[in-house]
Amino acid sequence: MRATVSRKAHFNAAHRLYRKDWSMEKNESVFGKCNNPNFHGHNYELVVSVTGQIDVETGFVMDIKILADLIKEHIEEAFDHKNLNMDVEEFKDLNPTAENIAVVIWNKLRSLISTDKELEVTLYETPRNFVTYKGE
């Protein structure tokens, strides 16, 4: 039998959407107020889901405590109360859009979770705007 377990998490972070190789006018046209040179912040909500076989001995797909600890150590501690553009190495040359943040989170966690399990990351930038990434 297969099942999916999910863990919710939260972090607050600031970012600015812009491309260094574009003019200020083009950045303003494409990214609007998200291009604010003084940055802006979000209260991100994160849902990490792991799908796999239910272990017959434990009844777990994955120990949710282990998943919670991985998220806390590798995501919340790395992103919470940070300026993503300036403080997080992965975004030094990568525009920190919700899409790119979700991919970075997935990549950070993928190597820590058994490859016989599927991994899905859903990142809410606002209650109505969110991205889902499954490694595809």
Image (spheres, helix red, strand yellow):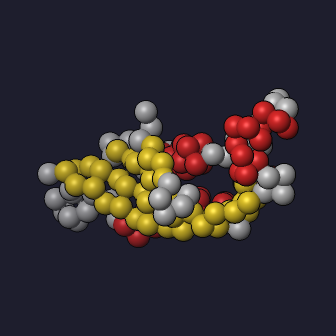
Residue positioned 14% across, 51% down in the render: 1
Residue positioned 39% across, 47% down in the render: 119
**Is residue 45 depicted above or below 122 in this figure?**
below
Which of 37 and 107 lies nearest the eye of the viewer? 37
Which of 131 and 34 lies nearest the eye of the viewer? 34
Residue 112 coordinates in the image, percent (x, y): 49, 50
Choose top left, top right, bottom left or bottom right for residue 42: bottom right
Residue positioned 20% across, 64% down in the render: 59
Residue 75 coordinates in the image, percent (x, y): 59, 59
Residue 92 falls left or right of residue 49 = right
Residue 54 coordinates in the image, percent (x, y): 21, 56
> How many labels were placed on the picture?
0
Residue 117 coordinates in the image, percent (x, y): 33, 46
Which of 77 and 15 lies nearest the eye of the viewer? 15
In this orientation, does residue 104 appear? no
Residue 59 falls left or right of residue 51 = left
Which of 116 and 29 lies nearest the eye of the viewer? 29
Residue 48 falls left or right of residue 126 = left
In this orientation, does residue 36 appear? yes
